[in-house]
Amino acid sequence: GQSVVAPVRCMRGRHFARAFARVMTMSTLSTVSLNATGGRSSVAALRAARRGSLLGPGFPPNCFRAPESSSRRAPCSLVTRAASGSAKSKKAQAYVCTECGYDANQWYGQCPGCKAWDSMKVMRGVSEPSTASSGKSSGGGAGARAVARIAESSAIEEASSIGIGRKSGRVKSGWVAEANPPRALRDVLGGKAKGSTMPRMRLSQELGKEIERVLGGGVVPGGMTLVGGDPGVGKSTILLQLAGLLGKGDSNSEDDKDGGAAGGAAVGVLYASGEESVEQVAGRAERMGIDPDGVFLYSATRLENILEAVSCLKPAALVVDSIQTVFLEDATGSPGSVSQVRECATALLHAAKTTGMPVFIVGHVTKSGDIAGPRVLEHIVDVVLYLEGDADRAVRILRGHKNRYGSTDEVGVFQMSDEGMKPVASPSALFLGERVLSPDVSAAPTVTVQGSRPFMLEVQALTNERADAGDSNPQAPPIRTAVGLRFERMQLLLAVLAKYVVGRSVLKNDVFINIVGGMKLDDPSTDVAVALAIASSFVEKPLPPDMCFFGEVGLGGELRPVMQSERRIAEAATMGFRRVLLPEAGSDESTEKAAKKNGVELVRCKTMADALQAALDVRPTRYAAKSQPNGSWPSKFPRKKKSGGE
């Protein structure tokens, strides 16, 4: 019986091998066209199919034969690999992190990139093009490929205005030229005057001058600027006004006198909005009185369409409102996702560098105040600007957080109106215009310097003693609120006041700090004004109305000098103040000359205790504030007396 069964099994195995070879031949023939487009000729594919059918009865060999438990599944897997292994492209399933954009072929509970939990989401139908179809591609992913396609369709062969051009031949996806040898710094400068190497597009009118102050001297051709801010603060408004200034054609470049092409032959500005229709943007421009000549409006969310419009119009500048609403078809994720924001920003960067066209993009912010999207967005762009302001106030502050072409210390002060943003010529007059002189108000004027411009602010403080809840009910902790001032800085000044000036009882009070005008103070030179405003409310005695205060407070209660004292004194004299309280350590001969020139009396103080006596005529309640004859502070633990026998 066994001798009869064995030949039968052998015959069945031979028939199965021959049938499998025929199936594989048919599947290989069905993929001949795919193999031919993927770089493999149809003849080679046919020969491979014939070799599979002529392998004989021993196919597949024992070493490649699957076990009996998976014998039904093995032929299907081999056929699948034979049909799809040489295809040009394939649809895959990828997992993308919604926080940082990290992609993987399998799911992870924790993202390997940003370590965020449960952030890997499945992305079905992801295209994986091969290098045979796209050629040798440089970095940038979908964004670089989109720019390369637009460049190929428009056949850009002329050199750009900033020296980065494209020669004849195949257009690559990167914006840096391949034949770009190293150059000596002396050759790059080329004997030009200092500051004239980087061309800039100058802006007209007072609004343009205020924006130039923040940008560091004008708009740089080929630069990419990101403008962020809270919803409704005026990002679209100020960029639409900027588009009107650039579209007039009177924004002269520094190299125009020498026949340079920094301005280029391109005229007009393309304003692409993904949040509003063309009619809505036009209505807002009409209300603000923007010159319609030279401004092109375009409503689109597909970035490929915007790049095609740029290729056709060749504008002098591009405004995209906003980066979270546009998308690329080749990139994964929905508009506003991490991967889409990164790839769209990369595409706009390539377009800016290859054409010499400045690009301005609007970025939304999160509830924490940071720009939405990946952190790499701020690294991609050249300039990052934040537009600050409260919804119930008309004052807007344009502040630079990153600038590759200038300083980040400068700020622009604007006032929101029906006609758009209006620059403020005198910020000090704006912030102190509504000053109330009352014995019930504890307010301390101070001078802060933002970049190259000093302006005055008013610091208001209020302290309120908490009622005793009794022994049965525990007393709630005191309230601390700071508007326009860092909370940590207020806590530091409260500790100094409690230890060296007014005693520990101030810590039992509710303390409220407000910077009038909506300005945010990061300058430590305003410490004296904040501390004296709190002390004035605590001792219930007003500060002199003709005295201004500035100086940094140390942890030991000492007053430290600050920079640009002469300019601060001059600004205080302009606003009508006759006395200035400042640290004694920072008062030198130049400061004395500035005070005499402006008719200002200087009140020099060493410590916060001295400042309290000079400003409020109040003696410090803490014994530690009284200096010893040698100038040292008394010790909390006095030295023990030695016994007579020692």
Image: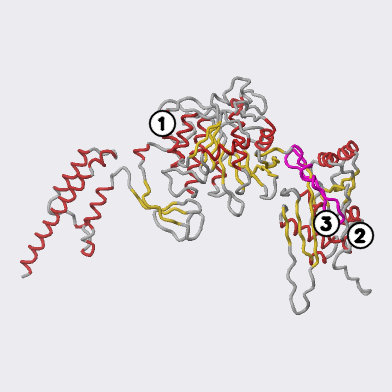
**x, y percentage for residue 418?**
66, 40
**Which span is picked out in magenta?**
425-454
Q: Tell me which corner region of the image, top left, top right, bottom left or bottom right, holds residue 480.
A: bottom right
Taking 19 as reference, is 513 left or right?
A: right
Compute the Cα span from label 1 to label 3: 67 Å
Residue at 90% from the left image edge and 47% from the top image edge: 603
Q: Which mark is residue 557?
A: 3
As drawn, 495 above or below 449: below
The residue to which callout 2 is attached is 619
For the residue carrying disc 1, how many other residues have a C-alpha within 10 Å: few (<14), some (14-19), or many (20+)?
some
For the residue carrying disc 3, how many other residues have a C-alpha within 10 Å: few (<14), some (14-19), or many (20+)?
many
Q: Is residue 133 magenta?
A: no
Q: Does the magenta stretch include residue 428?
A: yes
Mark 1 or mark 3: name the one nearer the start of the chain.
1
**Badge 2 element:** loop
The residue to which callout 1 is attached is 152
Give the quarter of the figure containing the C terminus.
bottom right
Q: Which amino acid does label 2 sit on?
A: Arg
Taking 182 as reference, is 397 left or right?
A: right
Which is in the foreground here, disc 3 or disc 2?
2
Mark 1 or mark 2: name the one nearer the start of the chain.
1
Compute the Cα span from label 1 to label 2: 79 Å
Q: Which amino acid does label 3 sit on?
A: Gly
**x, y percentage for residue 66?**
22, 59
**x, y percentage for residue 237?**
61, 40
Which is in the foreground here, disc 1 or disc 3?
1
Q: Which amino acid does label 1 sit on?
A: Glu
Q: Tell me which corner region of the image, top left, top right, bottom left or bottom right, holds residue 403.
A: top right
**x, y percentage for residue 265?**
54, 24
